[in-house]
Image: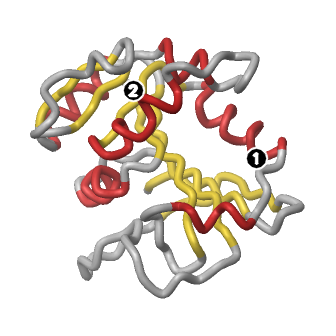
């Protein structure tokens, strides 16, 4: 059975929407290593429509020489949650699995022998978290509070607990916190 591994860039106040706030903090090689570690156990990618539409043109032409993550991003099977997209042909190995449905995601987890990597896709991740489908959160926490924007966790009134697996501080002020769901 697969597990869902989520990677997010997030502000101190929990905003994941439009991560342009990351631009003021130079990406350091150790961050790339940490992302590669998250991808390492994964055999597939799960994305929401908006993230897919942003990633497809950016990644589909990228080579391993330009970015060591390109082979994983381009060669892995990609599953896209969308009720409006009809064709995933803009990025090879992509399949549209329809509107969000927790049972469809559970079946996907059962069918993948390894991790399923999710990056960005805030709306999708909020739904996955609400349905208890996320197994690991890899949060790159940026030292900025935005005060507004789409947050990782929806207000639900439900307590959620996580177990810290590891943490790492980077020279640019970004903190990586890796949690497993309990």
Residue 182, percent across and down? 44, 56
Secondary structure found at label 1: helix
Using the numbered discs, state the Cα–Cα distance from disc 1 to disc 2 in whole angstroms.
24 Å
Q: Give the quarter of the figure containing the N terminus.
A: top left
The disc, 1 or 2, on the residue closer to the chain's N-terminal end is: 2
Q: Which residue lies furthest to the bottom in this view?
A: 147
* Image point (41%, 66%), residue name: 152
Task: Name the image quarter holding residue 40.
Answer: top right
Task: Name the image quarter holding residue 135.
Answer: top left
* Residue bearing mark 2: 2
Secondary structure found at label 2: loop
* Image point (72%, 41%), residue name: 34
* Residue bearing mark 1: 31
Q: Which residue lies furthest to the right in this view?
A: 171
Other-residue count near label 2 (Cα within 10 Å), few / some / many at <14 / 14–19 / ≥20: many
- Using the image as rendered, state which of residue 2 and residue 39 is in the foreground: 39
166 relative position to 13: left or right: right
* Image point (68%, 34%), residue name: 37
């Amino acid at each position: 059975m697969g597990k869902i591994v989520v990677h997010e860039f997030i502000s101190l106040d929990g905003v994941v929407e439009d991560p342009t706030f990351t631009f003021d903090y130079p990406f350091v090689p150790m961050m790339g290593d940490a992302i590669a570690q998250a991808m390492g156990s994964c055999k597939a990618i799960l994305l929401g429509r908006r993230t897919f539409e942003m990633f497809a043109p950016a990644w589909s032409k990228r080579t391993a020489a330009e970015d060591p993550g390109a082979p994983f991003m381009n060669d892995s099977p990609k599953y896209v949650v969308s009720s409006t997209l009809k064709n995933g042909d803009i990025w090879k190995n992509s399949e549209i699995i329809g509107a969000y449905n927790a049972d469809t995601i559970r079946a996907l987890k059962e069918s993948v022998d390894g991790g399923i990597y999710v990056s960005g896709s805030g709306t999708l991740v909020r739904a996955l978290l609400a349905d208890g489908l996320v197994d690991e959160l890899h949060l790159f926490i940026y030292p900025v509070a935005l005060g507004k924007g789409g947050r990782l966790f929806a207000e639900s009134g439900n307590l959620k607990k996580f177990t810290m697996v590891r943490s790492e501080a980077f020279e640019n002020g970004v903190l990586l916190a890796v949690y497993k769901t309990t």
